[in-house]
Image (tube, rainbow, N blue to C red):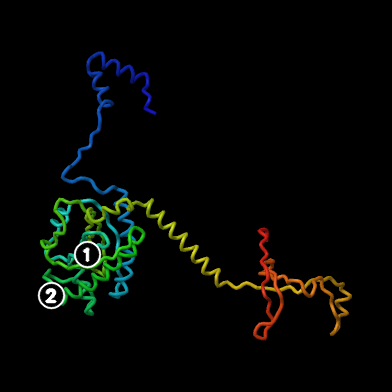
Amino acid sequence: MGEVLSQNEIDELLKALNTGEIDLKDIQEPSQQKHIKNYDFARPSKFAKEQLRTLEIIFDNYSRIISTYLSGYLRTATQVDVINAEAVTYYEFSNSLSNPVILSIVDFAPLKGSIVLDLSPNLGYSIIDRILGGRGSMIDKIREFTEIERILLERIVTQLIGLLKEPWENVIDLNPRLEKIETNSQFAQIISPNEMIALVTLNIKLGEVEGMINICIPHLVIEPIMDRLNTKYWFAVVEQEDKSAYKKFLEKRLEVAKIPVVTVLGRTHITVEEFVDLQVGDVIKLDSYINSDLEVLAGNLLKFYGKPGIHRKQNAVQITSIERREDI
């Protein structure tokens, strides 16, 4: 509901209209204006906010996984957080890189194409220092990586790439594979500079060293699964898988569950006096005949009928029929 004007305000407005201080068109124009949003054809929006939000959720899970892995592997406290996920052109991403870099070209199978994982050089030097027994401190001057350092980086990056499978399993069964590591950004042109990408940035604090991991995911690579990148689909799949897994778990547990099975030879009623006077050799008459089927109870429920006998020198009962009453 709009704001209600007082009588004094209405009088002042009418007075201003009569004197020409306010034009009636000035009052009507704002309601007639249409807000038009400019569309940039050079940077078409290919990622919806919901899809970027889903990517943040996926990599938030990934950040927890690699935090646990790096903490154990490097034996130092490691904290990983997702900063943001945004849609930019590949040119903007590659133009922000400075040499030397640690660019890992990753085959995102079964999807066609590759993604790029950019690890900050200071993190690379710190990781190498920890692997070789150092304290993981930063170096004073940025330099090129040696062949031995490249091999060590390749091993650690291969492990980080392998950990991508779990956070993506609700969307697609990934089989990522490291193709190569480039330390020069000019040799990592995997797509056209004007192509749109989803850029996910992770902040890593490795002891006293802090740096970034940028994951560049081209739109062309994940275009076949774009409809799955929404939380509604994701949580629906999770709920369905959880129900299926829980059902299988219950079935497996029930298969090995032990229940008491009792065969009833017969029933009768005696008085307390008769019970007290029972002696060895006394005979108690039952309500069943010698040739009648015996009741077989599972727990306290009547489930089968059978005949008594001997099996491998042990008392046994052979099932002759099944009780199929639905009310038991």
User: Amino acid under label 1?
Assistant: Val
> Does the CB distance between marks 2 and 1 fall below 8 Å?
no
Q: Which of the two residues, 194 or 9, is positioned nearer the viewer here?
A: 194
Question: Which is nearer the N-term, disc 2 or disc 1?
Answer: 1
State the SS at label 2. Answer: loop
On screen, residue 126 above or below 240: below
Image quadrant holding the N terminus, namely top left
Residue drawn at the location 40% of the way across and 54% of the way down: 235
Q: CA distance from mark 2 to mark 1?
A: 22 Å
Identify residue type, mark 2. Answer: Thr
As drawn, is 16 to the left or to the right of 269? left
- x, y percentage for residue 73? 29, 75
Displayed quadrant of residue 83: bottom left
Q: Quadrant of residue 265?
A: bottom right
- Estimate how packed mark 2 is, as few (under 14), some (14 to 19) or many (20 or more) residues with alpha carbons within 10 Å: few
Q: Position of residue 264 (x, y in %)?
A: 74, 73
Residue 23 screen position, x and y as percent: 23, 18
Badge 1 local density, few (<14 within 10 Å), some, or many (20+)? some
Q: Which residue is mark 2?
A: 146
Which residue is the site of mark 1?
Answer: 106
Height in image: 106 above or below 218? below
